[in-house]
Image: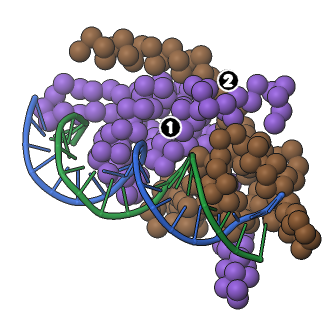
Chain colours: A purple, B brown, C green, D blue
DNA sequence: CAGTATCCATACCGATACTG
DNA sequence: CAGTATCGGTATGGATACTG
C-alpha cells in the first residue's frame, strides 16, 4: 500500500518492525502507558502492569531502554533503587499509543456488541 | 490511570486488552493497514500482507470481524467471492494505528543511535 | 529491592493437505 | 477462490529459585 509514503513496516527486514513490536507488543504498550504518569520503580511497575512476570517486565524494559524510549536510573544504594522513566521520544510514542488505547477502550461497548452478534450468528451453525 | 474509565486495559481480565492485542498483533495491524485503501478479497489481502499464511490471515480476519472492526461480505457464487472492508470503527482505529507507525518510523534514526549507545555501554562489561 | 537463571508447558505459526 | 484441518518445530512466557 501507499508505496509513495515510505511505508516500509510491511518489509520484513525493516528495523522499524522490531521497534514497533517492542512498542505494541504484549507488555511494551502497557509498560509505556504505565510510565506516562511519571517514573516508577521496578516493583511498582510490576504491580501496575497487571499479570506481567518479573522476567517479562525485565525483558520489556531492556528492549525499551535499548531503543531509547525508557531511561533507567539506578542508585547504588542498599537496598538498590532503580527508577524507570520515559525519554522525550518515549513519551511522544507512549502518548500516541495511549490515544489508540483510549480509542479502543472508548469503543468497547461497540466491540462487545459486535462479539455478541458474531457469536449469535455462528452459534446457530 | 483514569480510574473513571469503564474499561481499563491495564487490568488483566479486561476485554479491551484482547481487542488491543488483535489490533496491535503481528498481523492485525498490517491487515488493518492494508484495508485502509478499500475493500479487498482474501487472496488480494494475502498478497498485500507479505508473508502471512492462509491460516494466520484467516484467524486474524476472524478476530477483527468478531470485534466489529472488519466487515466480511460473502457472495454465494461459484467460485465464491468474499470481500473484506473496514467498518467505521475499524477505520478510525486503523488510522490511529497508522499514525503510531509513522511516528515510530520517523524516529528510527534516533532509535538506531540509542541502540548503538546501549551496545557500547553494555559491550564494555 | 531489583533483578538473573533455569526449567518446562503451551501457544504460536508455517507448511501441507484437503473441502465446498 | 476461500477457506478448514492437522502436524510439528519454535518461540513465548510463567513459576521458581537464586544472587547482589
Q: Relative to residue A114, is residue B119 depicted above or below?
A: above
In the image: residue B83, left or right of residue A40? right
Residue B21 point in image, percent of width and height? 57, 54
Q: Secondary structure at mark 1?
A: helix
Height in image: B35 above or below B59?
above
Q: Quadrant of the C terminus of chain A?
A: bottom right
Task: In this rendered view, identify the residue nearer to me: B10 or B51.
Answer: B51
Q: Is residue B56 visible?
A: yes
Q: Chain of mark 2?
A: B
* Relative image position of residue B90 (x, y in whole percent): 77, 56
Q: Nearer the viewer, residue A34 or B110?
A: B110
Residue at image mark 2:
B106
Q: Dividing the image into 4 quarters, which one contains the N terminus of chain A?
A: top right
**Residue in the image at 82% along x and 28% along y:** A3
Please state the horizontal and vertical placement of residue A65, each as a whole percent of the image. Answer: 42, 28
Q: As displayed, is residue B39 above or below residue B5? A: above
The residue nearer to you, when weighing B83 against D4, is: D4
Q: Indicate which disc residue B27 carries.
A: none
Q: Quadrant of residue B88?
A: bottom right
Label 1 chain ID: A
Q: Is residue B71 left or right of residue B56?
A: right
Give the quarter of the image for residue A80: top left
Q: What residue is shown at x 67% (from left), y 30% (from top)?
A: A11
Residue drawn at (70%, 88%) of the image:
A124
Q: Secondary structure at mark 2?
A: helix
Task: Identify residue for label 1.
Answer: A22
Amino acid at each position: 500500500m501507499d508505496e509513495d509514503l515510505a511505508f516500509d513496516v510491511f518489509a520484513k527486514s525493516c528495523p522499524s518492525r522490531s521497534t514497533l513490536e517492542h512498542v505494541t507488543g504484549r507488555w511494551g504498550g502497557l509498560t509505556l502507558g504505565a510510565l506516562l504518569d511519571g517514573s516508577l520503580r521496578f516493583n511498582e511497575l510490576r504491580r501496575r502492569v497487571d499479570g506481567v512476570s518479573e522476567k517479562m517486565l525485565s525483558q520489556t524494559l531492556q528492549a525499551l531502554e535499548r531503543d531509547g524510549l525508557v531511561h533507567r536510573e539506578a542508585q547504588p544504594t542498599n537496598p538498590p533503587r532503580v527508577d524507570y522513566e520515559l525519554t522525550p521520544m518515549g513519551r511522544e510514542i507512549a502518548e500516541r499509543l495511549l490515544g489508540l488505547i483510549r480509542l479502543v477502550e472508548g469503543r468497547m461497548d461497540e466491540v462487545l456488541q459486535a462479539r455478541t452478534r458474531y457469536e449469535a450468528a455462528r452459534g446457530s451453525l
